[in-house]
């Protein structure tokens, strides 16, 4: 099994545990002061430059680690049980974020 598939499987486990925030607006809101602050933000490889800049700037300002994945938004969405394009996800648990980072 490739590292990308292992990483997507680990993300699926995080989803089942309820430790994932989906979508850029929800991630930005959580960083601003939501109850579940993200420990790690992952963005798809094919997000627009504007979206990538927004995510990167927010992560830099709030001190959240940001990683751009090698897979596209449709692959990311399919692995996490969503039906449409998914630009970014955030993991709210630090231990689970370390588990996902192992395969990146």
Image (cartoon, rainbow, N blue to C red):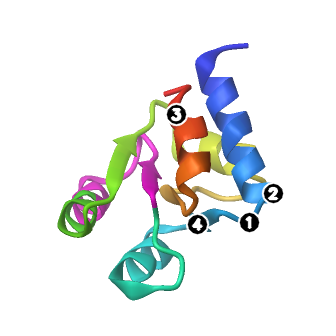
Q: Is residue 27 above or below residue 2?
A: below
Nearer to the camera, 73 or 63? 63
Residue visible at 37% across and 42% down in the picture: 67
Tell me the crowding category of disc 1: few under 14, some 14 to 19, or many 20 or more residues within 10 angstroms, Cα based. Answer: few
Residue marked by disc 4: 22
Name the image quarter holding residue 100: top right
Residue 76 lies in the magenta stretch? no
| Numbered disc in front, either 4 or 3 | 4
For the N terminus, the image quarter is: top right
CA separation, marks 4 and 1?
11 Å
User: Bounds of the magenta span?
Assistant: 39-55
Residue marked by disc 3: 71
Residue marked by disc 2: 16
In-image side of 85 versus 12 (left or right) = left
| Numbered disc in front, either 4 or 2 | 2
Mark 3 or mark 2, which is nearer the start of the sequence? 2
CA separation, marks 2 and 1?
5 Å
Given contact means CB atoms under 8 Å apart, are the residues at marks 4 and 3 in contact? Answer: no
Tell me the crowding category of disc 2: few under 14, some 14 to 19, or many 20 or more residues within 10 angstroms, Cα based. Answer: few
Mark 3 or mark 4, which is nearer the start of the sequence? 4
Mark 3 or mark 1, which is nearer the start of the sequence? 1
Residue marked by disc 1: 18
């Amino acid at each position: 099994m490739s590292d990308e598939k292992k990483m997507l499987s680990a993300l699926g486990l995080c989803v089942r545990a309820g430790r994932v925030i989906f979508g850029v607006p929800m991630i930005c809101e959580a960083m601003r002061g939501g109850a579940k602050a993200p420990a790690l933000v992952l963005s798809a490889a094919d997000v627009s430059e504007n979206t990538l800049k927004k995510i990167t700037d927010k992560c830099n300002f709030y001190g959240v680690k940001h990683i751009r994945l090698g897979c596209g938004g449709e692959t990311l969405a399919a692995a996490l049980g969503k039906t449409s394009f998914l630009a970014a996800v955030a993991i709210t648990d630090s231990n689970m974020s370390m588990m996902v980072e192992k395969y990146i």
